[in-house]
Amino acid sequence: MRRENEFAVGVVVIAAFGVVVAGALWLSGAHLGRTEAVYTARFRTVGGLSVGDPVVLRGVRVGRVEAIRLAPGNWVEAALKIYAGVTPPAKPAVVAAPASLFGEWAATLISREPAPSDPNVRQALDEALAAGAGKWPGATLPDIGQLTAQASRIATDIAAVANRVQTAFDTEAVAELRRAIREFGQIADRLATVANEQADVLGSVGTKLRQGSEVLGKAATNLQTTLGRVDSATNQGQLLTILNNSAATSANLRSASQDARDLLAAAHRSQESMVRVLVSADSVFSRISNRSGTLGLLVSDSTLYRETTLTMIQLRQLLSDIQANPRKYFTFSVF
Amino acid sequence: MIAHVGRSAVAGIKAVGRFGQFVSDMVRALSDVATWGRLTPVQMRRVGVDSLPVALFIAAFTGVVLALQASYTFTGTVPLYFVGTLVGKTMMLELGPVLAGLALAGRVGASMAAELGTMRVTEQVDALETLAYDPQSYLVVPRVLAGTAMFPVIVALAILTGILTGWLASLLLLDLSTQEFIKGLKLFYRFKDTWFGLFKSATFGFTITLVGCIVGLGTRGGAEGVGRSTMQAVVYSAVLLLMLDAFWAMVLLR
């Protein structure tokens, strides 16, 4: 009975011990019996990275974070245990970043050649590298909380802008905007109508162009025929005669043109004289109209006209009297 | 009224004194290895091995319920593989030790209080003393040692059972693959999860068996007293277990 008790207890204890040890090793991802290399990475901050987090190379888990400790010079050093058989990049660097939205972090091994495209990561790696050799440079990406806080700030700014827009964009502005949109619609309708009309016109133009093109084609054909005739006329010396005649005609035309130019110059001079005469006449008529000068007075003053008429009458009478009685006015003597 | 308060205070102080005296006697009895050494395996069998079915039964259904409740809660933005995380963490840190402890408080604590109480009221304990047997090394130390040693064993197997049934429930009742469940299980695992639960369960075992022995050996008044002691042992054990649970959480998880 006593032996039976001891056996039962022993079985249960061994089973539990085995479960605990095997479970803990399996869950923590330990690799028993395999040599693991430990490397140290230098960070300014490790963010949410903690002991036990995975070390990842090109998406594959190749180790775990063994320890994290503060180091002189405001640095943080993380010991990374890399599984046996894994070859790190030639120029390794470590980027600590969230592995998911739920607080999981991972240390990702990357190569510094080529340099990371993110300028912040590149700067952090350069700074860690400049702090001394022998340790892998490390950079940390912002966690979800920081990104969320940044997004919150952006959302606040957008809300402020939206409030301002709402303030400026009151009911009246909306009404005006609606009216403008309505008018814009009408304009668009008109533009569409005009465009349709223009399309019709362009269609017509196109038709006419096609017709003109056909006419030009015919003209070209005729020209080709004419040129053929010219070509045949050239063969008989008729073109030379025509050219000679054309030269003579051209000389005559030049002479006639010179005559015409002289004629035009004379006409121009006559026109200038006429202008001067007209200007003088205009001056005279102006003075007459203004009742200045003799003619003006004659035109405007009836007394003078009557007196002049009377004078003329008297002159006629005097002439008649002189003709009738010359001795009354003239005396002739010889010696 | 004032006299009542005074009596209560004196009773409390006496209880603390008796407890201290009891513990010091037990520590002194540890030197009597010849006595408790041969009796401890028997108690380990009774406390540990014979209690396994109850603890595993409770843990099995706890694992299933945890998986289903986790999937019900996580519907939406939280990925379903967190079912594995929740099942593993909860079984290791809390439900495995506490539920097993509560179950064993009823089974082990009550049986010890009833057994020792019966021995007390039937004067068997007095007979042992007459025969120069130390009741501490003969009755108490084997039980307390057995409880302290075997509770972590029971809890470890209960945790394994709970995780296995949680995995089976996820596989059969939820749209979750084995790989996803294991991914969630390993996601936030720390070795502290394991030793915290086992250490806590050892303190639970110590407390439950100690309370059972103290209450049992303090039994007075015949069969009625035995019944009262049994009830007190269960109640005190359960209350102390939950207080210890909170205490260790505050001390070790902060």
Image: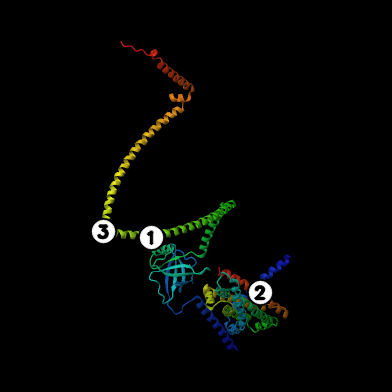
**Which numbered disc flags the more N-terminal residue, 3 or 1?**
1
Q: Is there any visible trace of residue B76 in the rendered image?
A: yes
> Badge 1 is on which residue?
A218
Q: Is residue B81 above or below residue A146?
A: below
Same chain for the residues under marks 2 and 3 in the image: no
The amino acid type, in three-letter code, at marker 2 is Tyr
Query: Answer yes or no: do the residues labelled 2 and 3 have beta carbons within 8 Å?
Result: no
Badge 2 marks a residue whose secondary structure is helix
The amino acid type, in three-letter code, at marker 1 is Lys
Question: Residue A139 occupies which quadrant of the picture?
Answer: bottom left
Q: Residue furthest front?
A: A324
Distance from Cα at disc 3 to Cα at disc 1: 27 Å
Read off the chain for label 2: B
The amino acid type, in three-letter code, at marker 3 is Gln
Seen from the viewer's position, the closer of residues B16 and A116 is: A116
Q: Residue furthest top?
A: A335
Badge 1 marks a residue whose secondary structure is helix
- The label number, if any, that marks residue A236 in the structure image: 3
Seen from the viewer's position, the closer of residues A135 and A54 is: A54
Position in image of residue A114 (x %, y %): 39, 67
Read off the chain for label 3: A
Question: Residue B144 occupies which quadrant of the picture?
Answer: bottom right
Q: Nearer the viewer, mark 2 or mark 3?
A: 3
Q: Is there any visible trace of residue B46 in the rendered image?
A: no
> Badge 2 is on which residue?
B236
